[in-house]
Each structure stands twice: as structure tokens, then as C-alpha cells.
Image: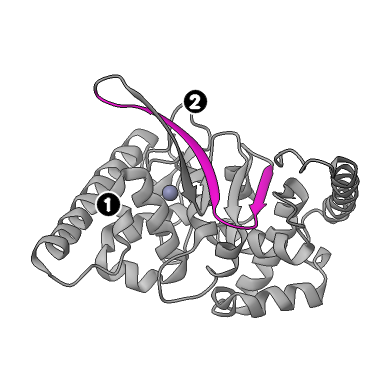
């Protein structure tokens, strides 16, 4: 939910919220009625969002149409709200939807279930200030606020800083905030309550033609190997001035961040990621159902 209204503006805020909720209910009904048909998204609106996102311009026509259908189904299932007075319009919601659905375009509608653990998406007008509470090694509790561009938490909502959503649709730099946060949501999907993201999402049955336990072991092995290699390269850069790896150093933070950052990089420039991490990129191909990967062959 959005934070409480500013003092003295409660009535206006409630009216705005009711208006927004009615508008979204209309959109959701319309998209639901069409069963996620991409035609539910008006042509002019779709063209505008494609123009805003170079990532979408790089897709072929068939991929873009598939993505449009996915966006319609996504929007029918999600609820957007704006924090601190930010009004979320259709274009803003579709800009988020298009980037969130981009990694799912090969697997199509069934993969939308990866986002079923949450409904709410909150856009902030600026960086998000998240309260933090950590206990240090000697038992002292520290409370502070952390500035974030976005956050995904178990059960939702997904929180995104709107200026960063707008600025992350480009190609070549390997960053995309929306894909990053939704990759955390994929990682968290189906995990027991309270369990943190760990870079090991629930794997599609038959991934790599392997039984579930073997596929999981392979995933874990490749994740650890690629993360160790990335940490080594980052270390060489920081200590000895070697060229920095193309992949963002933030991926070295943890297995969960490695998964999220490599999902961004994979969607923005798969070839470039492949050049640095071929085996890991092959696993992401299989996970996202890329045509270059062997199709899933369920065996158990
Ligand atoms: Zn992250």
C-alpha cells in the first residue's frame, strides 16, 4: 500500500485513490475479458512504450507481439500505486510491465506464474528510503535508513523508483532496474516464508533434460563457479588495476545479487554476458526457454 496521506489532504488523497482503483479495475476487467490478448493494449500506447524502450526495438515482430500479450495478462493480475502523490498512468504501468515480462517472452503465459506471489507494485517519485535494523557481531542493534532504487520482498509489493524505471530501458550498459527486482521475485517464488533469495529459483521441470535434483545440483555448481570467477575478476581490477569485467561488480555481492544482475545483463546484452560467462549464460538460456537452448524434457 501507499504511505499515509500528507496531513490536511486526507479527503483528496482518498478521492484520488478511489479514482485510481476504479480506473485500474476497468483496465483489469478489460484485459481479463480478452484473456491476456495483446490487442487489449491500445496501439498508440504500445507504440509509445516501444519508442521509450530500445530493448523492445531490438526484438523481432513476433517476439514483440508475444511480449504485448504477456503485458496485457500481467497488467490484468497486478495492482499499481504511486507513493508520495505520484500518479501512475497507463504508460507508466506498461513501461514496468514490458520490462518485467521481457525475460518471460520465450516461455510465455505459464511463466507469469513466477510473479504470482505478489500483486502490488509501488512506484516512488524518487529513491526509496527503506528502514533497516541489523544486529552486529557483539549484539548491538543498529537502525538506519537505506536509499534504494528498488526492492522486492516475499509476498510483495515490488517497489521501484520511477526515475530509474524510465532510465533503465537502454541497451549496452547491462543494467535494468525493473528486470533486477523482478529477477529477485523469480528467485523468491515458491520459497518458504522467511527464506531469503539465494540465486536458486524454482527450476522448470525437465530443465536440461535432467531429473529435478540433478538440475538443481548443476544450477548450484554453475552459480558458484561463475560467482567465484566474477569475484576473482573484480578483485584483480580493484587490487591490480586489471580491466574491469563488463558485468557489474555488484553481482559479486551474493548469489542472489549475482542471479539478479546476470538476469539484467542477459536481457540487455546476452552475447556480452555469454563472452564472460558462457556456461552460466547457457543455464539462463535453458531457464528462460531461449530458442538456443534444448527444450525441457520432463523425466520426473
Ligand atoms: Zn538486488
Residue ID at (78%, 73%): 45
Q: Nearer the viewer, residue 112 or 86?
A: 86
Q: Are marks 2 and 1 in contact (CB under 8 Å)?
A: no
Residue at disc 2, secondary structure: loop
The crowd level at tag 2 (other Cα within 10 Å; few <14, some 14-19, many 20+) is few
Tag of residue 169: none
Q: Label 2, on which residue? A: 192
Task: Work out which quarter of the rendered image holds the N terminus and state it.
Answer: top right
Residue 83 lies, in percent from the top left, at 69, 49
Tag of residue 252: 1
13 vs 68, left or right, is right
Residue 163 lies, in percent from the top left, at 59, 64
Q: Which residues are magenta?
A: 120-137
Q: Main secondary structure of the magenta part?
A: strand
Tell me if the residue at label 2 has its CB under 8 Å from ligand 1: no
Residue ID at (39%, 36%): 212
Q: Is residue 125 visible?
A: yes
Task: Work out which quarter of the rendered image holds the C terminus and state it.
Answer: top left
Distance Cα–Cα, label 2 vs label 1: 25 Å
Amino acid at each position: 500500500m501507499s504511505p499515509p496521506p500528507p496531513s490536511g489532504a486526507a479527503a483528496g488523497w482518498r478521492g484520488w485513490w478511489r479514482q485510481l482503483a476504479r480506473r485500474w479495475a476497468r483496465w483489469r476487467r478489460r484485459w481479463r475479458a480478452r484473456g491476456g490478448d495483446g490487442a487489449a493494449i491500445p496501439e498508440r500506447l504500445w507504440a509509445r512504450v516501444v519508442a521509450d524502450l530500445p530493448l523492445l526495438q531490438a526484438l523481432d515482430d513476433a517476439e514483440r507481439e508475444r511480449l504485448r500479450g504477456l503485458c496485457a495478462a500481467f497488467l490484468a493480475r497486478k495492482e499499481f500505486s504511486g507513493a508520495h502523490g505520484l500518479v501512475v498512468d497507463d504508460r507508466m504501468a506498461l513501461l514496468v510491465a514490458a520490462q518485467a515480462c521481457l525475460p518471460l517472452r520465450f516461455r510465455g503465459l505459464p511463466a507469469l506464474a513466477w510473479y504470482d506471489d505478489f500483486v502490488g507494485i509501488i512506484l516512488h517519485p524518487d529513491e526509496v528510503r527503506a528502514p533497516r535494523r541489523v544486529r552486529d557481531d557483539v549484539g548491538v542493534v543498529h537502525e538506519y535508513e537505506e536509499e534504494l532504487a528498488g526492492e522486492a520482498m516475499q509476498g510483495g509489493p515490488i517497489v521501484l523508483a520511477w526515475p530509474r524505471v524510465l532510465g533503465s530501458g537502454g541497451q549496452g550498459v547491462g543494467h535494468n532496474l525493473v528486470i533486477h527486482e523482478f529477477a529477485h521475485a523469480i528467485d523468491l517464488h515458491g520459497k518458504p516464508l522467511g527464506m531469503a533469495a539465494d540465486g536458486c529459483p524454482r527450476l522448470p521441470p525437465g530443465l536440461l533434460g535432467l531429473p529435478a535434483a540433478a538440475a538443481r545440483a548443476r544450477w548450484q555448481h554453475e552459480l558458484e563457479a561463475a560467482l567465484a570467477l566474477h569475484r576473482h575478476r573484480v578483485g584483480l581490477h580493484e587490487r591490480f588495476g586489471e580491466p574491469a569485467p563488463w558485468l557489474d561488480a555488484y553481482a559479486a555481492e551474493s548469489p542472489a545479487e549475482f542471479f539478479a544482475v546476470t538476469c539484467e545483463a542477459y536481457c540487455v546484452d546476452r552475447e556480452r554476458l555469454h563472452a564472460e560467462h558462457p556456461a552460466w549464460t547457457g543455464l539462463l538460456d535453458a531457464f528462460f526457454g531461449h530458442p538456443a537452448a534444448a527444450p525441457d524434457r520432463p523425466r520426473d
